[in-house]
Image: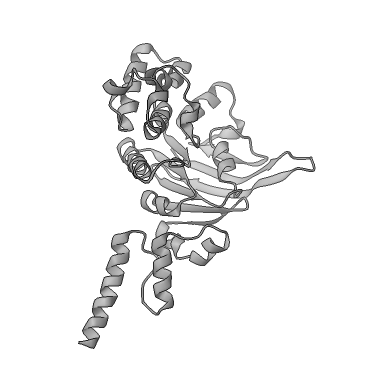
Amino acid sequence: MSLIIENLSYTYMPGTPYATQALDQVNLTIKKKEIVGLIGPTGSGKSTLIQHLNGLLKPTSGQIQIDGLILNEAKGEQMRQLRQKVGLVFQFPEEQLFEETVFDDVAFGPRNMGTSEEKIASRVRWALEAVGLNYEEIYRRSPFNLSGGQMRRVAIAGVLAMRPQILILDEPTAGLDPQGRDSLLNQIRYLWRKLSLTVIVVSHHLDELARLANRLIVMHQGKIILDAPPAQVFEQAEILRQIGLGVPLLTDLLSRLQEKGWPVSLAAVTEKEAARQIAEYWLSKQAESA
């Protein structure tokens, strides 16, 4: 399922003294089965952009196409179907859990769609297992008696139970400990591969997106300023610093080595790549001095 954004602009409180332009002529195409990281400083327009992708906000100007259908013109049943195809998981989604059992929380969306109870049972089991939870152990429990990481997964399962083709996650690791963050990021990448989803992940953490996404989109002041694979984005370290994002620790290390004359590239996005560059140069220097 392709997603095409054309000349998208959005202004909060238009026509008032408090009017604020959050998006400014955004153009973007995301292809089927991509896993994309969306990053930018606070106020850059990230959250406003993703709220347009399932119709929560309507553009001030421009349009959004999903599989050839113009989202901002869709109404009634057509809008309902489009929203089923685009699953949006908000930041701290566990705060939206409200049913007495995990089963009922995950089943809430499909029930609202009019899905039969027989199919709902199958979907709930599938969705919980897809996010790495044991159905038999958890489906009768209260979601409020789970760990933070488990609650986050239940909330994601509730969106997956709708069988979306595009999954959007807003700061999915916010508030989790390092182990919980790593586990959830691995689960997201697993879901992307297993379910052939198109995945868009919003985050403030370049380090996380470097390991997760195969494409990074950097926003600043309502515009897209960088759109490339992680390695190419990190080569623009000075731009990232100028907009207040900073750079991943690996990029910072390699940048400092560059300043000292080491012939290393900022394109490394994993510890293994960085270690290889450093080792190759170090061994070459040792060979020269032998």
How many callouts does the rendering have? Answer: 0
Q: Give the left or right position of residue 147, taking residue 21 as reference.
A: left
Looking at the picture, does residue 280 appear above or below residue 130?
Answer: below
Q: Nearer the viewer, residue 261 or 13?
A: 261
Name the residue located 57 percent from the left edge and 37 percent from the top edge. Answer: 52
Residue 70 figure quarter: top right
Instruction: Find the residue positioned furthest to the top.
Output: 117
Q: Position of residue 113 (x, y in %)?
A: 47, 18
Name the residue located 27 percent from the left edge and 82 percent from the top edge. Answer: 285
Residue 18 figure quarter: top right
Q: Give the left or right position of residue 36, taking residue 271 as reference.
A: right
Q: Nearer the viewer, residue 193 or 238?
A: 238
Q: Position of residue 236 (x, y in %)?
A: 49, 65
Q: Quadrant of the N terminus?
A: top left
Q: Give the left or right position of residue 195, taking residue 287 as reference.
A: right
Q: Position of residue 130 (x, y in %)?
A: 31, 31
Q: Nearer the viewer, residue 106 or 231?
A: 106
Figure coloring: one colour
Q: Quadrant of the C terminus?
A: bottom left
Residue 206 figure quarter: bottom left
Instruction: Find the residue positioned furthest to the bottom.
Output: 289
Name the residue located 42 percent from the left edge and 26 percent from the top edge. Answer: 158
Looking at the picture, does residue 22 appear above or below residue 146?
Answer: below
Looking at the picture, does residue 196 appear above or below residue 262?
Answer: above
Q: Position of residue 20 (x, y in %)?
A: 71, 45
